[in-house]
Amino acid sequence: MNIKFKLFIGLFLLCISLNAQNKIDRLYINVNLKFNQEDFKLKLNYVSIQKDTLSFETVKFYLTSFQLEFKDNSIYSENNSYYLFDVENPETIQFSIANHIDKEIKAIKFNIGVNSLTSVSGAMEGDLDAIKGMYWAWQSGFIKMKIEGKSSSCKTRKNKFQFHVGGYLEPYYAMRNVNINCNSNDKKSC
């Protein structure tokens, strides 16, 4: 099985693919960022649609709570799963979400960010460990997405920018749900 889909996150195109090669394999998520159709890399110069020159030093975000819905209407849910994607750390671009499942996937659902209950639970371990740089404090919770870099259009010192997106209470609830329907007749694509 090889399922790929694309999702826009602000400036980036997030490409995620699900891969399982045979019956003993696990199902893996591979995350690949694109910028204007190019493979994304830190510290390279990119030109936006508005003709701004951008260079990124940090890109991190959480992918959480994966759910697979199959053609037979059964569902596989991965509860309390938190994957921190960090462009600087190649080990984070691929992670396993399930043992091999020999069923056709009808839909994939997941969240970008951390839910409100986790946000108020304090710093934890693993990808939720405060040492990862994605936790503000018990009052503010987790940063859902962090993007830092330089832009020629920023009127800041050394043209630097920082976007730390978070919030777990309305009207600032920052977690986003992603639902992808797989309507292809080809078992290998979504």
Image: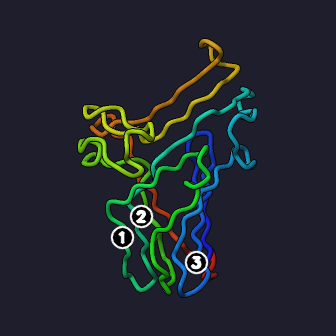
Q: Nearer the viewer, mark 1 or mark 3?
A: 3
**Mark number for residue 158?**
none
How busy is the neighbourhood of tag 3: few (under 14 within 10 Å), some, or many (20 plus)? many
Q: Which residue is mark 1?
A: 77
Q: Secondary structure at mark 2?
A: strand
Q: Secondary structure at mark 3?
A: loop
Q: Secondary structure at mark 1?
A: strand
Report which quarter residue 186 is drawn in: bottom right
Mark pair 2, 3: CA separation: 16 Å
Please report whichever mark, 2 or 3, sits nearer to the chain's N-terminal start: 3
**Mark number for residue 20?**
3
Q: Is residue 86 above or below residue 186?
A: above
Q: Is residue 74 above or below residue 77?
A: below
Q: Looking at this view, is 132 or 58 the one in front?
A: 132
Mark pair 2, 1: CA separation: 6 Å
How busy is the neighbourhood of tag 2: few (under 14 within 10 Å), some, or many (20 plus)? some
- Pointers 2 and 1 in contact (CB under 8 A)? yes
Q: Looking at this view, is 69 or 66 the one in front?
A: 66
How busy is the neighbourhood of tag 1: few (under 14 within 10 Å), some, or many (20 plus)? some
In percent of width and height, residue 147 lies at: 55, 34
Report which quarter residue 149 is drawn in: top right
Please report whichever mark, 2 or 1, sits nearer to the chain's N-terminal start: 2
Residue 70 can be seen, yes or no = yes
In percent of width and height, residue 180 lies at: 50, 64
**Mark number for residue 66?**
2
Q: Looking at this view, is 79 or 170 the one in front?
A: 79
Please report whichever mark, 1 or 3, sits nearer to the chain's N-terminal start: 3
Residue 105 placement, left or right of 188: left
Numbered-mark total: 3
Report which quarter residue 183 is drawn in: bottom right
| Residue type, numbered disc 3 | Ala
